[in-house]
């Protein structure tokens, strides 16, 4: 695994490649397309009442925000293979924990690994709970300090590598 920043976001090679392709598309052909749409709408006349112009400008803003987000993720990415299925919690694992007497299952790592799987919650390995459980093994119990100042106990029930 290659660490590129102290607070790197773990990504599988597949997720990293997918995000690079998205960034290339948005910052190249995507920018050209939106510029053409804005120019065409501008030629229609009065910009105050031009819905097409305002929609295109709004889309441009969203696209530029995504470009900035992708650039930041990729610059601070730690790219590696999927973690081994050895019961040790690490980024890229789907973890089931007992928290407040209830089971909760989530992906430890970046939402970008899950590629649109909105059914799975994601916790960053940099979050208080992520830091506490990272490196723990199935069956272990650990605690972490919540942002509210309360100490929270977490028991690791399952840890399996994420697979799409």
Image: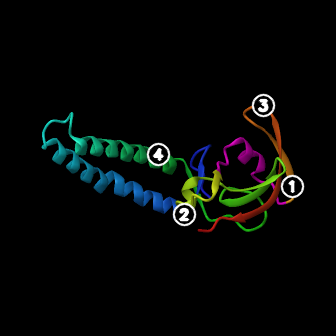
- Residue 149, disc: 3
Q: Is residue 30 left or right of residue 102?
A: left
Q: Nearer the viewer, mark 1 or mark 2?
A: 1
Q: Is residue 148 left or right of residue 141?
A: left
- Residue 140, disc: 1
Identify the mark nearer the N-term, 2 or 4: 2
Q: Which residue is mark 4?
A: 69
Q: Which residue is mark 2?
A: 13
56, 86: nearer the viewer: 56
| Secondary element at tag 3 | loop
User: Where's residue 125, x and y in %?
Assistant: 67, 48
The reply to whether discs 4 and 1 touch (Cβ–Cβ < 8 Å) is: no
Identify the mark nearer the N-term, 2 or 3: 2
Dot 1 crowding, Cα within 10 Å, few <14, some 14–19, many 20+? few
Q: Nearer the viewer, mark 2 or mark 3?
A: 3
Dot 4 crowding, Cα within 10 Å, few <14, some 14–19, many 20+? few
Q: Is residue 107 left or right of residue 13?
A: right
Identify the mark nearer the N-term, 4 or 1: 4
User: Where's residue 53, x and y in %?
Assistant: 23, 42
The reply to whether discs 3 and 4 touch (Cβ–Cβ < 8 Å) is: no
The residue furthest top is: 149
> For the point 74% across and 51% down, which residue is it?
134
Cα separation between marks 4 and 1: 35 Å
């Amino acid at each position: 695994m290659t660490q590129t920043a102290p607070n790197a976001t773990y990504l599988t090679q597949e997720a990293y490649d997918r995000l690079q392709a998205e960034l290339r598309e948005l910052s190249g052909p995507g920018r050209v397309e939106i510029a053409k749409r804005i120019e065409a709408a501008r030629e229609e006349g009065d910009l105050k009442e031009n819905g097409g112009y305002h929609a295109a400008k709004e889309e441009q803003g969203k696209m530029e925000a995504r470009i900035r987000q992708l650039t930041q993720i990729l610059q601070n990415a730690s790219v590696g293979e999927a973690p081994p299925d050895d019961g040790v919690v690490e980024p890229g694992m789907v973890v089931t924990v007992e928290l407040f007497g209830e089971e909760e299952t989530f992906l430890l790592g970046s939402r970008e690994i899950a590629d649109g799987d909105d059914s799975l919650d994601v916790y960053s390995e940099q979050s208080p709970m992520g830091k506490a459980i990272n490196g723990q093994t199935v069956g272990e119990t650990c605690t972490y300090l919540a942002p509210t100042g309360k100490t929270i106990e977490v028991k690791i029930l399952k840890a399996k590598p994420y697979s799409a």
